[in-house]
Amino acid sequence: MEKNKSENQLNEPTQNPFAQTFFHGTKAELKVGDFIEVGLSSNYGQRKNAKYIYLTATLDAAIWGAELALGEGRERVYLVEPTGPIEDDPNLTDKKFPGNPTMSYRSKHPFKVVGEITIWKGHSPEQVKAMKEGLAKLKEQGIEAIED
């Protein structure tokens, strides 16, 4: 049987229009090719070394991630590819949004940064303030935003 001449001869990754797109919101400055890995200070809570890293398949959830991330710097949303298995984020899916409508996931395996979304619209200042106040109330009650 003759091979298709357009077949990728170099075993390089090819674009697949049906592949799932994943996003990661943060204030960290990253470059294409960088890896987001466990073990670094978390963007949230008490900034413990992260046991998991998080991604989402919705731009809105990634924007929230960027807006709520601790630290200085510009809010950023990256396109990422998981390098290993991902699982539903129990911080959201089990407690706040059963069925995972936010399409939020976590992993212990690195995510490769493959691009940055540079044009996006954030939430209103009132929405961000209300979300931060809600998180502060949870913190006062001893409830961490991220539980490992």
Image: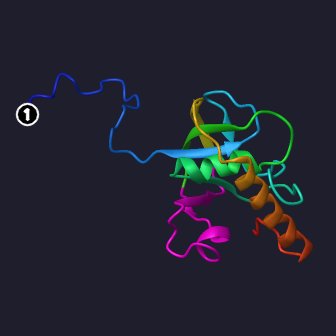
Disc 1, SS: loop
Residue 47 point in image, percent of width and height: 87, 55
Against 14, residue 86 (above or below) is below
Residue range corresponding to the magenta coloring: 85-109
Residue 133 point in image, percent of width and height: 83, 62
Count residues near mark 1 (Cα–Cα under 10 Å), then give few for <14, some for 14-19, many for 20+. few
How has the structure been colored for display?
A: rainbow
Q: Residue at x 83, y 74 (%)?
A: 143
Q: Which of 8 and 124 is in front in this view?
A: 124
According to the picture, the residue beneath numbered tag 1 turns out to be 1
Q: Which residue is drawn at 76% across and 37% down?
A: 28
Amino acid type for the residue under numbered disc 1? Met
Q: Residue at x 15, y 27 (%)?
A: 4
Overall secondary structure of the magenta stretch? loop
Image quadrant where one finds the N terminus: top left
Against 99, residue 3 (above or below) is above
Residue 67 point in image, percent of width and height: 73, 46
Based on the picture, tell me whether residue 23 belongs to the magenta stretch: no
Label total for image: 1
Q: Which of 23 and 82 is in front in this view?
A: 23
Against 77, residue 146 (above or below) is below
